[in-house]
Amino acid sequence: MTGDISLLEAEFSALSPRRAVQRALERYGDELVISFSGAEDVLLLEYAATSGHPFQVLSLDTGRLHPETYRYFQVVAERYQIRVEFAFPDAAAVEQLVRAKGLFSFYEDGHAECCAIRKVEPLRRHLAGRRAWITGQRRDQSPGTRAALAPVEPDPVFRGKHDQPVLKFSPLYQTTSAEVWAEIEALGLPYNPLHARGMVSIGCEPCTRPILPGQHERDGRWWWENVNKKECGLHRPT
Amino acid sequence: MTGDISLLEAEFSALSPRRAVQRALERYGDELVISFSGAEDVLLLEYAATSGHPFQVLSLDTGRLHPETYRYFQVVAERYQIRVEFAFPDAAAVEQLVRAKGLFSFYEDGHAECCAIRKVEPLRRHLAGRRAWITGQRRDQSPGTRAALAPVEPDPVFRGKHDQPVLKFSPLYQTTSAEVWAEIEALGLPYNPLHARGMVSIGCEPCTRPILPGQHERDGRWWWENVNKKECGLHRPT
Amino acid sequence: MTGDISLLEAEFSALSPRRAVQRALERYGDELVISFSGAEDVLLLEYAATSGHPFQVLSLDTGRLHPETYRYFQVVAERYQIRVEFAFPDAAAVEQLVRAKGLFSFYEDGHAECCAIRKVEPLRRHLAGRRAWITGQRRDQSPGTRAALAPVEPDPVFRGKHDQPVLKFSPLYQTTSAEVWAEIEALGLPYNPLHARGMVSIGCEPCTRPILPGQHERDGRWWWENVNKKECGLHRPT
Amino acid sequence: MTGDISLLEAEFSALSPRRAVQRALERYGDELVISFSGAEDVLLLEYAATSGHPFQVLSLDTGRLHPETYRYFQVVAERYQIRVEFAFPDAAAVEQLVRAKGLFSFYEDGHAECCAIRKVEPLRRHLAGRRAWITGQRRDQSPGTRAALAPVEPDPVFRGKHDQPVLKFSPLYQTTSAEVWAEIEALGLPYNPLHARGMVSIGCEPCTRPILPGQHERDGRWWWENVNKKECGLHRPT
């Protein structure tokens, strides 16, 4: 497998983001799913939709997203004429957490526990039958945790079909935020209206805030925590 | 039971809302739960908190509430030093609905299906072990469906402990919206900030809107549907 | 004049609001102006526009209106294909006040001084050449100050052409807020979007706030002052 | 004068922004005024306030600012215990423009006419008695028009005392937006809350909008006009 990965990485590091999405779809077909967060990773869907291949989309509905994000999911689903697969948290796990600690425990003892219930576990369940997934991660999103992100790697967190490693593709790994936004504008893609209210990185509503001019996008997430730990558990820091 | 109910109804129809809450707590203790929607039914919690009795609070977190409502739950929990029990929808049921019909199917074919998954089933589960619950329903909330609401009745929808009928108390059944708000102001109770943005009846975010001057509060809920069907299934029209 | 007024009052008290606007336009032509505040008095413009007579509209731009109100003026101007005459405050007077007391002195020592500069003086200047004006005042707007409002009266505050009394028509004097809003909805008229954010009575931005359910519309204006003094000086309390 | 200016420019180009403000205050005393726009140029006021010298502040109240900006003026005035001098537009000029063209003519035929009335003329009046003013202009604010901005120059637009040239100091001419914001954060200065809603460059409400991630701050101003003309007339393009 290590050898395969080296070859894959060599192959995909030579591809443009658009070509990488296309190539991954060709290789893995319906055993691959594109993760869509409701933010600027809409670019992945655009690439997929124009690739000529069918594609599947998976989103995490944590139960605490912004109303604007839910509506944006709908806008995107209509644009690309797709049915998004949503991963939703387990009722018992959520009920137990909020009964014990209230609805905002993350402000007190960190976001890991809540993310584990609302994001990691549901995603694990939904990746279990797949061989590969595509994420919109970029190296420039989080200096502390994503600086060494690869174009493709065996997912360090999740397992796939038959409990085998699931491949994680990150076609935008070298793309910068400025490039992503220039392309969204050039292609006239719809965007989450929260981006026009000062939010750059968008996640759950209580854990997202607008940034001030000059701040890094990661300053808008989990701002009460240490800058080097700003991952939700979906992606192990590189 | 019919006789008992007549006696109960006679007893509770003679009580002020405050006394009715107190009396229900005395009678049913920890087999009773107070339902709190995150709106002006905060009055029930105030009555309970000042009754001298311990009390339990149950809220429905449908996964689609306004961010302001989640924060208001927290404000209330801190004020009364309580841990609210939240009922959360079943993941598989939500995932199946949104996969098949998207996140806003209620605008197309009515709110009953979504409410059944996000409100009715979770509440059913959480009432199953109880003998009684208290709601903030009022006759004036919905001319089409709540005009004959009783101060107490065997719940027409839910079953309680040992699959026996669960009693539903509605201490505010004869109270008007104006009276509720006068009391909230007089007592200086915290309120959901959405009430200061034109919303009167508050439910899920996509199914709630501000009303214009002169409109009935029910015009702010499920406005695309017939006025006489505006119940979410928690309460059978009277 | 007293006799004339009695006759006029008798005539106009028998007219519907719509007919009253029409009749006033017929009588006074271009010596009459309709005052439009940017709120629910849009009804007056609708009546004028459908009367078949030309009409003039005067609005007060105090320099502190809500952005939404400015936009609503534009919507209305386009709908009725009119050029609104705006009365704007005198620069020296505004500069002197804000230099001496800051931009929010009204919260400290009352709104009379600011209203005198931003509303009363500009209106005085713009009524000076007229013989009559129409206002949207209603008796139910302010129990403390408007309970005895007449359908027409010599304006108790302003003078008109040749320093003669200017007639003030209030065709909606007996209409209730609920009736006004029912008609706006029935006619499908555009409304200030602030009305859909909990504001009922709308004036300057710092002196207007949303009201809670059950509050009187006047609770949304100059809320830090005594309820019986809530006039801006345009209208002497009746 | 040219020689003087060369010397002055040499002197001020060697000073830090903080020292430049201090030095200008020492030289020109009460014949100098600091211009404050209600945005990130608050840094100038901080430098002045900590310089130990008395200082005067001038702001333009165009009559169309955001409510948030008016409130921010007040916050700043209280923090520094100052009375701000506001320049307000001439009533007749505003009334004539809006009567003829409506309240949003700038969207149709450019912002120059409105800016001339609401900003340039009032500023001209208020600079007339001065020998110097300080602005928060920076070279990086507008690539098309401010790239050659000097630390000090005879104002190319306005005249001062005795109709002599008025000196314009721009202590932040070489400072970048990122540096300004880092300092605002480091010093804990209050900022206009619109900066936390996606707005970077802030002017009049109808002529300001939030920018998307990756856009230049000037994209948030007069976006319907050519990028190289984005000056309001206060500052001649360099």
Image (cartoon, coloured by chain):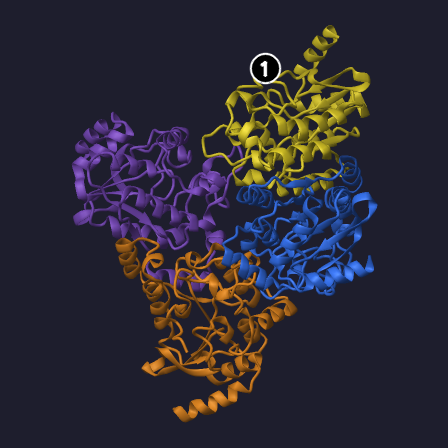
Chain colours: A blue, B yellow, C purple, D orange
Q: Is residue B117 visible?
A: yes
Residue A121 position, x and y percent, is 78, 44
Residue D98 quadrant: bottom left
- The chain holding disc 1 is B
Left or right of D182 in this view: A143: right
Residue D81 quadrant: bottom right
Q: Amino acid at mark 1?
A: Ala
Q: Looking at the image, which residue is at 64% across and 60% down?
A: A217
Residue D208 position, x and y percent, is 45, 59
Q: Is residue B101 or residue B140 the one in the foreground?
A: B101
Q: Is residue B50 visible?
A: no
The residue that label 1 is drawn on is B148
Quadrant of the image containing the C terminus of chain D: bottom left
Q: Secondary structure at mark 1?
A: loop
Quadrant of the image containing the N terminus of chain D: bottom left
Residue B192 quadrant: top right
Residue D52 position, x and y percent, is 57, 78
Quick one: which residue is furthest to the bottom in this view? D3
Above or below for B83 versus D139:
above
Q: Is residue C25 or residue D139 the one in the foreground?
A: D139
Quick one: which residue is furthest to the top in this view? B3
Q: Is residue A226 or residue A33 the one in the foreground?
A: A33
Above or below for C5 versus B124:
below
Q: Is residue A134 or residue C147 the one in the foreground?
A: A134
Residue C197 position, x and y percent, is 49, 41
Above or below for C155 versus B17:
below
Q: Looking at the image, which residue is at 33% across and 82% down?
A: D162
Above or below for D201 versus A28:
below
How many numbered marks, from 0 up?
1
**Mark 1 neighbour density, 10 Å: few (under 14) some (14–19) many (20 or more):** some
